[in-house]
Image (cartoon, rainbow, N blue to C red):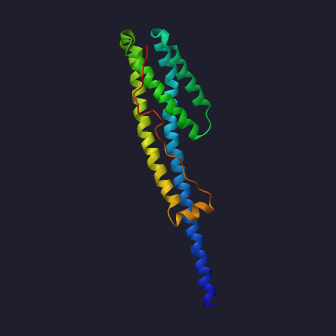
Amino acid sequence: MKGIIILIAIILFIIVITIIYQNKFVTLHERVKNAWSQIDVQLQKRMDLIPNITETVKGYAVHERETLDAVISARNRYINAMGTEEKMKINGEISGLLGRLMAVSESYPDLKANINFLELQKQLKEIEDKIGFARQFYNDTVTSYNQAVKMLPGSIFAGIFNFKEETLFKAEEGAKETPKVKF
């Protein structure tokens, strides 16, 4: 009789621990998804701003067509992108292109003085700052989640419940370099 009680206690203990870890992973994974959504919201704001910026620049910088087309093309690819990884990759490309586009504006004094352009530039800077904070929060959240997935005993339950590591948001190749503008 005593052995049955001990066996039942062990089984109950395992069930409780399993439920605790399942809920922990669900909570952490939902936080990761929420953090990505926060980035996605800011990136969408930036995508919505891109047509206004390019149209404003287009009027002044007619021979910068290649840069403008590249920005619009990357924006369209981002909008149609499937999955976090693809969006992260295209986002890095867009960041570089927008940096190049803003650098181009330095060569056009009339554009730099244009009130619409200045407002768009201000909005873009604000969005870029928010994207930076959202990326940092996302990476912190993913790091906590990944640690839970990798560390014992969590790694055992993560494997049982099929929770996998998430990808950190990293700077793309060349993103740390200053954009080069050629005339």
Residue found at x 51% / y 33%:
91
**Quadrant assignment for the N terminus:** bottom right
> Where is residue 111 shown, x and y percent of the image?
40, 12
**Quadrant assignment for the C terminus:** top left
> Where is residue 118 shown, x and y percent of the image?
38, 18
| Residue 133 figure quarter | top left
* Figure check: 59 above or below 34: above
> Where is residue 181 shown, x and y percent of the image?
42, 19
Nearer the observer, 109 or 66: 66
Q: Residue furthest bottom?
A: 1
Horizontal side of 149 relative to 112 (left or right) equals right
| Residue 160 figure quarter | bottom right
Residue found at x 50% / y 19%:
67
Nearer the observer, 107 or 16: 107
> Where is residue 32 shown, x and y percent of the image?
52, 48
Q: What is the tally of numbered marks visible in this picture?
A: 0
Residue found at x 49% / y 23%:
49
* Figure check: 110 above or below 173: above
Nearer the observer, 7 or 109: 109
Residue found at x 49% / y 44%:
35
* Figure check: 141 above or below 99: below
